[in-house]
Amino acid sequence: MMKIYDFKRGPYPARVRIALAELGLQKKVRFVEVDLRTGAHKRPEFVEKNYSGTLPVLEMEDGSFLSECTAITEYLDHLGASPRLTGVSARERGMIHMMNKRAEIEFLDPISVYFHHATPGLGPDVEVYQNAEWGRHMRDKARLGARHFDKVLSGRPYIAGESFSMADITVVAAFVFAAIVKLEIPAHLCHLHEWHERMLARPSVQTWRDLG
Ligand code: GTS
C-alpha cells in the first residue's frame, strides 16, 4: 500500500487529497500525519524522505519517495488507464502544466511565503528566518494573481481550458491558504468566485472539507 505523509488541514496536502478523491484512489493509501507545528518536517529523518522538508510526500509501494504536489498528482493520475487531471493530448498537457505552474508561482506559493514571513507562521521554533517585507510583497503578488485568474475564467470554465484539471486543484488550494491567512479575494472578481463555488460543490473538494 502507498503511504502519504501529510498534515490533514494543510493547503498543499489538500491538493493531493483532492486528486486522490477525483481519481477514486483514497483506499489505496495510508496517511501518516506529520505535525508541522512542532517542526517534525525539518528533522533529519523526514528530510531523508524529502530534501525540501515539506509535505506532502508519497511513499511508493517499492519504498521510493515522491515529493512536490505536481509530481505526486502526475504519478497518481497515471496509475489508471486514462489520465484525468493532467491531460491526454499534447495541447492539454502543455496547457495544464503551464496553468498549474502559474497557479503555484502567482497565487498559491506567494500566499505561503506571506504566511511564513509576514505572520507568526508555524511559530518561532520553526520560522528561523523571516523577512516581513518580502512576505508582504508576496501577498500583493498573490492579489495580482487572483486578478489574473479571474480574467482567465472570464473566457473559459476551468483554469486550463474546457475541463477540470490539476490546475483547478492548485487554485482551490490557494483559496484554502487565503482563508487561513485571512487574505481577502475581492468580491468583484466574480468569475473567480463563481468558479470557486463550482469547485466547492465537487464531491472531491467536499470530501476534503468534511475532514474537519
Ligand atoms: N512545492 C511544494 C509542493 O508543491 O509540494 C510545497 C509544499 C509545501 O509548502 N507544503 C507545506 C509545508 O510543508 C504544507 S502546508 O503548509 O500546506 O500544510 N510547509 C512547511 C514549511 O515549513 O514550509
Image (spheres, rainbow, N blue to C red):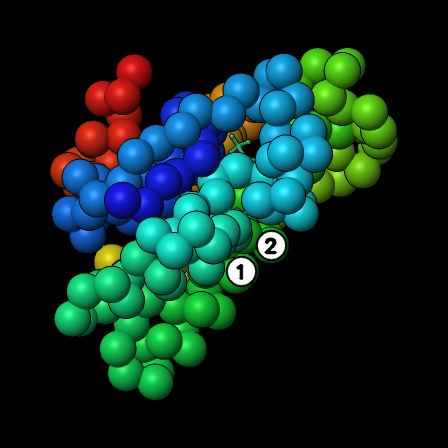
Q: Determine whether label 2 and label 1 are within 8 Å by CB.
A: yes
Q: Quadrant of residue 72?
A: bottom left
Where does residue 3 sit, x and y in percent of width and height? 36, 40
> Left or right of 116: which side holds 207?
left
Asked whether the viewer can see residue 75, the reply is yes
The residue carrying mark 2 is 105
The residue carrying mark 1 is 102
Where does residue 75 sit, x and y in percent of width and height? 36, 61
Residue at position x 32%, y 39% from top? 17
Where does residue 30 sit, x and y in percent of width and height? 30, 34
Residue 130, labelled with which disc? none
Q: CA distance from mark 2 to mark 1?
A: 5 Å
> Left or right of 185: which side holds 204?
left
Whereabouts is ligand 1, in terms of quadrant?
A: top right
Where does residue 24 sit, x and y in percent of width and height? 15, 47
Relative to 46, residue 99 above or below: below
Asked whether the viewer can see residue 142, the reply is no
Q: Secondary structure at mark 2?
A: helix
Q: Amino acid at mark 1?
A: Arg
